[in-house]
Every structure is written in C-alpha cells, then in structure tokens.
Image (tube, grey):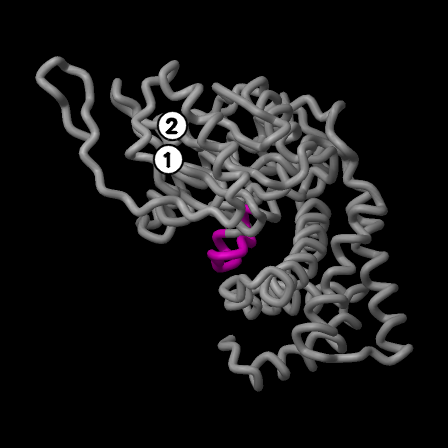
Amino acid sequence: MTASPSGTASVAVSLPPIAWADTERERAFGHWFDELAPRHHLARASLHLASADASSRRYFRVASLDGGSFIVMDSPAAEDSVAAFVHIGGLIRGAGLNGPRVLEQDVHQGFLLLDDLGDTQYLAALRQADPAGADALMRDAIGALIQWQLKGDCSTLPPYDDALLRREVQLFPDWCVAREFGVTWTAREQETWRTVSQRLIDSALAQPQVAVHRDWMPRNLMVCARNPGVLDFQDAVRGPISYDLASMLRDAFLSWDEEHELDWAVRYWQEARHAGLPVDADFGEFWRQTEWMGLQRHLKILGIFCRLKHRDGKPHYSEDLPRFFNYATKVANRYGPLRSLLNLLEPLTGAAVQAGYTF
C-alpha cells in the first residue's frame, strides 16, 4: 500500500491469482465481491490468500483504498457452519472480546467480509518471545478466557454431550490406530479402550458447563492492540469448564514445561474463582479435571491429524503426532484409573518410531 497525493491509498501489487477448484464457485464469488467492493472501497487487485485451515475454509486478505485491510472468508462447507460462525462471532463480541465483525455476508454461499485482526498469531509471537513477553501474552489469553466463560451466553450453543465426546474420541482408534498404524486391537485391548474412554467422558460430563471455544489455542489467538484477537470459534459448544484451558496449555503446535503449565493453570484458577466461575475449590482436583480433559482432546487430535493425512491429503499435520503421544503418555502414567491406556499407547509409539516419526 502506498499513499497517493490526494491522501487516499493506491495499491501497487502483483499477487498470484487465487486458485479455484470449482469454476462455478469462482464465478459466484466474483459476483458477490464485485457488488460489495464499492461500498467498502476494496482494491480487487490486492486480493490474496491469507490462510487456510484444516477444513475447507480459506481466508483472503484485501486492501482498502482508504487504508487498512479486510478479511474475506470462503467457506464451501455446509451453510449451517457459516451461520454458526456469524452467530458465535456475535456471542464473542457480546462477551466483550475482540472478535471480527461480520461486515457483509452471504451465508447460503459461504462468503463473509470481516474485520482484519492482523497477521500475527500468538503461536509465532510466543515462539519468539522472551519469558516475560510470553507470560504477558498468556496472561492476556487467560483474562480473555475467563471473560468468555463468564459473559459468553452459552444457552444457544449445542451441548458437548456424551454423543459428541464419544464421536470425537472414537477418531483415535478409527484413524490413528487402524488407519495410520494398521493395528487391530484384541478383545482385551478393546475393553481397555472402552473403560478408559468412558472414564474420560464421565469426567468431562461431570464438570460445570460454560461456553467452550473448543480451539482456544495460540494458532487461533491474534496479537492485537486489544489482546487477544479471537478467531476460529464456529465450533463453540456448551461444555466442560476445563476444556479451553487444556487447549491453551497443551497446544497442538507448541509445548511448555510443566512448571509453566502449572503456573498459568494456578493463575487461571485463582482468577476464575475470584470472578465467580464454578471451578473446583481444590486446585488439585481442578488440575486432574484439566489433564483428563486434555487427554480426551489429545486422543481426538491424534485421530484428526491422521484423518487429515489419509482422507484429506494434508499430511503435514501428522508431523505433530509425537507431541500428542507424549501428552497422552504423561497423563495416562500419572493417574491410576488411566494407566491401562499405556498398554495401547506404547505399541503405537514404537510403530511411530519405526515409521520415521521423531519423539
């Protein structure tokens, strides 16, 4: 972007065209974009791919002739997913958090024009930060999480119920055990799995229920003037109070030593109690809930990353499988009722090493 003598912005860019697999969708997008561009003074020549995620959604960035930029969401997924993004985005902002406004929408076709919260993810900032800088970012994220749980209206969110928890955790045997490593469990191993997974589900369902972002992790939090910017919230549910904290402390792409995990967990627990959130009065029990909730999530993600590799042609996610095996092994080894899970994890860890994964 360069400033013109009149004070407006002129755009001098040479960007590769956005690739479209579906010419009909490309045409529909062009009609939609051309209609709204004059209202927001959008510079079409600046339109470029900003990011893509594990789903079919893509995000484009486009400059404004007045300065600044916007984000365009292209979501060819089901219409209800886009409607959920619009609805839950309203809940995020209604809770006083820094989520993007929806400025234009075509929910049926899956096109949205959004505020641009910048391109600095917490993930990149935390990797580059010194200890004091990382702590400041995490404290901001903890404060925002408490605000979300306290003020986010979860009454209209779908429940994180037994059926959903069970579908999620089943991704592990279906895609990681059977598809990635070709392992068939014996009847005894299947019974071990049923027992352990039921304990994790029961623990989750017994927790107080609040608004759950479901991916409150550094990749979905943005460094902004008002920290953090919150993205990727369309799968929010009404569920266990420890879930989002577990997501943040034991991330898919960034790991902390346990001293840092506990320090931030205690800080969250103290501030949550002070704010009136229904966390357990005993921190030890709350930490147990958080670790068990995290284990449910980690088993799910082991399955999801393998599904992305084998079904969706996105193999790079599987590079982080060792991180999740390490998370899961640590928690299973720590708690007696979960220790039998080690009998299922250890052969897979050996198979992963043989397959070339680095632990």
Q: In this view, does 329 lie to the left or right of 166?
A: left
Magenta residues span: 248-260
- In the rendered picture of this protein, how many numbered marks are placed on residues? 2
Q: Which of marks 2 and 1 is nearer the N terminus?
A: 1
Left or right of 241 in this view: 59: left
* 253 falls in the magenta region: yes
Residue at 71% over, 42% down: 282
Identify the secondary structure beneath mark 1. strand
Viewer-side residue, 57 vs 341: 57
From this view, report whether residue 325 is shown above or below residue 352: above
Q: Mark 1 points at which residue?
A: 61
Q: Name the residue under label 2.
A: 70
Residue displayed at 66% across by 35% down: 81
Q: Residue at x 36, y 16 (%)?
A: 38
Q: Which residue is found at the position 32% from the left and 48% from the top?
A: 129
Q: How crowded is mark 1: few (under 14 residues within 10 Å), some or many (20 or more)?
A: many
In the image, farthest residue toward the left: 5
Name the spot of residue 7 as percent of width and height, x first: 14, 15
Q: Is residue 172 above or below residue 268?
A: below
Contact between marks 2 and 1 (CB within 8 A): the answer is yes
